[in-house]
Amino acid sequence: MKVFKFGGSSVKDATAMKAVSKIIIDNDDCRIVVISATKNTTNELELIAKESIHSIPKSQELWDKTISRHREIANDLQIDCEFQDLDSEVLELIGKFNKCQMISSEYMDQLYSIGERLSTRILSEYLTSHHSKTVLYKDVREVLITNDNWSKASPLITEIQDAFDLKWKEILKNSLIVTQGFVGVTTEGRTTTLGREGSDFTATILGESLGANEVIIWTDVTGVATSDPRVVENTKFIKKLNYVEASVLAKLGAKVLFERTLEPAIRKGFSVIVKSTLTPSELGSVISDSPPHNGPMAVTTQGDILSIVGDKLLSEKAHCSKRLLEMNQIDYHVHEQEDHFICFKIPSSQMDKALDVVHCWVLEFHQNE
Ligand code: ADP
Ligand code: ASP
Ligand code: MG
């Protein structure tokens, strides 16, 4: 049994939604599909909230653009999708923000949830008419119970398992569920979110409840690479990663995975696979309890911190990386250092160069893979 998660760029328009649907239809053992908001929608919702403080009409104008874009996707897919209820909900929230002259974090989470509720409605409707299986749109707030730490909520695992067993377990025997990433709910029924990019985490939380043997994070790159392939040249995709290495990489800034994604996988021992929606036949990166890399595996940056991630990085490897920076006249200082990572603070003017030289060094350790 598998859970699939598709990110914003994988569902950005009708063509992308069709490609995603084909992947789902071709994979019989996919039981739950978790979807992000369409590309840029969550950012648009943030702007709508900000604008609502100054001007209700301007904020509504922005919202009109967002909802029209979703209506266009539904039209292009030739499906009937009603968004009237979501439209009213957003207009009410805009009014509330304006009246209070403040964006409360609780209501912001409710506004955030609209993005995923729009995208899942469209995809589930399209799948319903194209899949031979019964496809059900489900509001994730039926099961994904969290604390009330608005905009960075933590899942309550026991409550989630109980709700899942009660509400979804039986249904899943005969149907495929399409549901929202990122969104949760408190025990009192108030909407929460797990943090920006949190849909990856939703997928593994639901994978844990389902007893899945695999969760696939479908995205716009072939897998986890030695560095961000959109920033660094000649990156190499890593076929196998150990849970710890992948978690550390995510926590130190690699956007490809939300930082808490692997917690449920580590608890239950299922694999998480990162694959591309654009090239579904490629194997992607498998994250499991496989042996760690003996040395540096990847390099990532976050602000002025450059981090080398891998295993057995203390001693000799740390020494080599420092020498490398010195030889290239980069002013560094060691910010933090452990067996799985070395974090250097680097002046912003030297970051590009540092990333380049450190990445070339990391690549040497992948030569024989
Ligand atoms: P999604 O919308 O599918 O969640 P994200 O944009 O959140 O996608 O994550 C995928 C992006 O992560 C890639 O397009 C890539 O630019 C970035 N990225 C950063 N570090 C890495 C890495 N080490 N390996 C692969 N991708 C990375
Ligand atoms: N839509 C949310 C965001 O853009 C969550 C996600 O995409 O995972 O942050
Ligand atoms: Mg993401």
Image: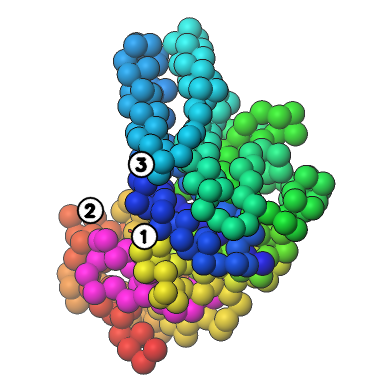
Q: Nearer the viewer, mark 3 or mark 2?
A: 3
Q: Quadrant of residue 176?
A: bottom right
- Mark number, residue 359: none
Residue underneath mark 3: 76
Q: Secondary structure at mark 3?
A: helix
Rendering coords of residue 108 (x, y %): 51, 27
Type of amino acid at the residue the image marks with label 3: Asp
**Residue depicted at 54% across the width and 72% down the height:** 287
Residue underneath mark 1: 220
Q: Secondary structure at mark 2?
A: helix
Label 1 vs label 3: CA separation? 22 Å
Label 3 vs label 2: CA separation? 45 Å
Rendering coords of residue 181 (x, y %): 55, 46
Q: Is residue 205 above or below residue 30?
A: above
Image side of residue 195 versus residue 141, left or right: left
Residue underneath mark 2: 348
Q: Is residue 114 above or below residue 159?
A: above
Q: Which residues are magenta?
A: 220-245
Q: Is residue 38 above or below residue 243?
A: above
